[in-house]
Amino acid sequence: MIRHIWTVACERTIIADDGIVSLIAVIDRIETPVLPLALLTGFSVVSWFFSDDLDSTVHYRLRCETPNAESVFDITGQAEFGGFPKSRLVVDLRQVVLKTPGVHWIVVEIGQEDGALEEVARIPIEVVLSPAESPSQPSPSQPESPSQPESPSQPGDSD
């Protein structure tokens, strides 16, 4: 039996020579001032599976649905366990285009050769339209200058 352990979307995945995986900048929300948004550098979806049968092959389908149930991408394939009880699947997605705001779902389905695919994970990524910064307005990192400088608070000061 093949079990899905976890799935994560992230900006980048690094796999060291010793097999240790680093997931860089986990993605659960994307803010943008305009849509459609072309993610030219893309992102990675990483899943981890476990099987009692060390010679198993997991057949997978990885897809993304918009809030309107439209498809952003739909990928199928297979991953071998190769004599180990666990198998890691890293799918690098390039040139993904997001057209609508709202919650997009990355859906993971798995199965074996002789069976139908079964949904095992549904990961939300929220796409949010953010207001574009106007050059005439101060940014949050640069507050407006007060008319009189504020004095720094000292230990023991009270309001």
Image (cartoon, grey):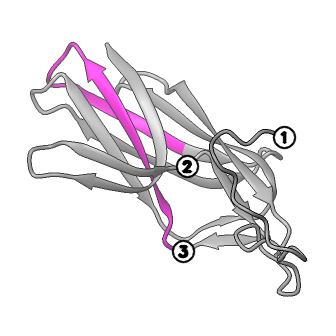
Identified by mark 1, the residue type is Asp
Q: Which residues are magenta?
A: 41-62
Residue 7 occupies quadrant: top left
User: Residue at image x 28%, y 37%?
Assistant: 88
Q: Element at badge 2?
A: loop
Residue 124 occupies quadrant: top right
CA separation, marks 3 and 1? 51 Å
The foreground one among 87 and 57 is 87
Q: Looking at the rendering, in which quadrant would you find the N terminus?
A: top left
Instruction: Determine which residue is flagged by label 2.
Output: 27
Q: Looking at the rendering, in which quadrant would you find the C terminus?
A: top right
Q: Which mark is residue 99?
A: none
- Give the vertical position of 1 relative to 142 (above or below): above
User: Residue at image x 18%, y 22%?
Assistant: 85
User: N-terminal of the two: label 3 or label 1?
Assistant: 3
Camera-near label (3 vs 1) is 1
Instruction: Determine which residue is flagged by label 3.
Output: 40
Instruction: Determine which residue is flagged by label 1.
Output: 159
- Give the vertical position of 46 relative to 4 (above or below): below
User: N-terminal of the two: label 2 or label 3?
Assistant: 2
Principal secondary structure, stretch drawn in magenta: strand
**Callout 2 touching callout 3 (CB < 8 Å):** no
